[in-house]
Image: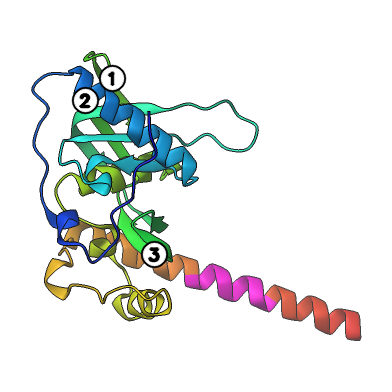
Amino acid sequence: MSIRKVVKYGEESLRQPSKEVHKVSQKIKNLVADLLDTMYAQNGVGLAAPQIGEHYRVFVIDTSTGNEPLNPIVFINPKIIKKSGAVISHEGCLSFPEAFTDVRRYSDVMVKAMDRNGRSFVLEAHDGSLLARAIQHEFDHLDGILFIDHVINRFEAEEVLKKCNLPDIQLDKILAEPELEEKIEVLMKEKIEKEAKAQKEKADKQEGAEG
């Protein structure tokens, strides 16, 4: 169909909740086509309708990489019916050009939605996969929630936004997620210990080579 302009962070429309689709009409099918065309043109993994100024509960995802054939998945009126686990997700967003930061996500999700033909389906994604994280990211857009609302290190994220000439984080939008935060703290500790161990091994190797 056509490549649409992507709404950028700072525009209030990104914070507006979207309405359910009552019928998968030609208008909705055209919207899906525009979402896919725009996502591929921007080399994105996912795109939600509010990001092109259409406030319907619709988003698209394609996690194929390299020489893999395109594998678009269309979600209309999605509902996350199960979520568990935790993962540190390094994310960006087409509405936040060049900005990336670590956020909290569930590692496993189950979602129920309709496809572009109005057929209902259930999809599971596990182990903090790109698909699992993308589903949560795009689903959030439908409720006016942005990935930086799940930020792990607010100060680090603010520096990233500043470098990218994007507006500051909206502090009142940051989500309290005690269940996830507790699990993420454990993961962060494991990550720091792993990095420290790797640095020590590298230093030991260099010392051995010099000796």
Q: Does residue 145 show up magenta in the picture?
A: no
Task: Please give left or right for residue 23 compared with residue 60 in the image.
Answer: left
Place residue 88 in its image quadrant: bottom left
| Residues under numbered marks 2 and 1 in contact, where contact means CB atoms less than 8 Å apart | yes
Q: Which residue is mark 1?
A: 116
Q: Which residue is mark 2?
A: 28
Chief secondary structure of the magenta portion: helix
Q: Position of residue 129 (x, y in %)?
A: 44, 42
Is disc 1 surrounded by few (<14), some (14 to 19) or many (20+) residues within 10 Å? many
Q: Is residue 201 visible?
A: yes
Task: Please give left or right for residue 148 compared with residue 101 in the image.
Answer: left
Q: State how many labels appear.
A: 3
N-terminal label among 2 and 1: 2
Q: Residue at x 31, y 53 (%)?
A: 105
Residue 70, placed above or below residue 128: above
Marks 2 and 1 sit apart, C-alpha to C-alpha, by 8 Å
Is disc 2 surrounded by few (<14), some (14 to 19) or many (20+) residues within 10 Å? some
The stretch of residues the image draws in magenta is 192-200
